[in-house]
Amino acid sequence: MLVRNLTALVAAICIGTMAATALPATAQEASPTPSRSSESFGDWSVDCTLAVTPAQDDGPQDAPRRVCEAVQVYSSTNNRAEIARLAFGRDAEDGAIVVAMRFIADVSFGSAPELADGTSALLAGSITRCTGGFCFAQFESGEDVAQLLLGAENPTIRYPVSSGQVLTIGVSTDGLTEALETLEARSQ
């Protein structure tokens, strides 16, 4: 089985190499920056994407810029589908760290999502919008959120769902410091 998989891998590499050499010179001279990348640090990852701003009618198109996030994804234990994603990123205008959460749209607007340490609320967020089956919340001051998470004994994110219950998700800090350092380096 290993030999057959290794043979398939070698064949795929050879086909890819032949296809790459057949590309026109302009395609081969493209930027060495990947259009997407992901690096893992414990329970966190840093995901980067090249974002292209659409050209305005009266001017040239801006060069692509790299947009990176340090993320932790939370999945359902039943079917492994994503139920929430906590992300640190950089504001494009002022470079400040922002923290946002995306979660399934079964949310109640009766109270705000919050960062907590066990049963003690640390910082309230606000729901900013809902679209495409997800709702989005934002927390003020990303530096404060990072310090609160790292200093918490039992860090969690809590948010109300439409049934009236409050969903509590444990937040791991394993790899958070390294992910934030990498986010800083990739966002330059």
Image (cartoon, rainbow, N blue to C red):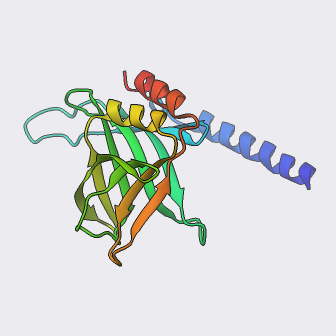
Point out residue 87 in the picture as x, y percentages from the top left corner: 40, 44
Q: Report the front residue among 137 and 1.
A: 137
Please tell me in which quadrant of the rendered image residue 95 appears.
top left
What is the quadrant of the C terminus in the image? top left
Q: Is residue 184 above or below residue 145?
A: above
What is the quadrant of the N terminus in the image? bottom right
Q: Residue furthest front?
A: 120
**Image point (25%, 63%), residue name:** 111
**Image point (26%, 58%), residue name:** 112
**Image point (46%, 33%), residue name:** 151
Point out residue 178 in the picture as x, y percentages from the top left corner: 53, 27
Please tell me in which quadrant of the rendered image residue 140 appears.
top left
Q: Is residue 100 visible?
A: yes
Q: Report the front residue among 118 and 99.
A: 118
Q: Report the front residue among 175 and 153.
A: 153
Q: Is residue 135 left or right of residue 170?
A: left
Q: Is residue 65 visible?
A: no
Q: Is residue 82 left or right of residue 13?
A: left
**Image point (23%, 31%), residue name:** 62
Q: Residue furthest left?
A: 58
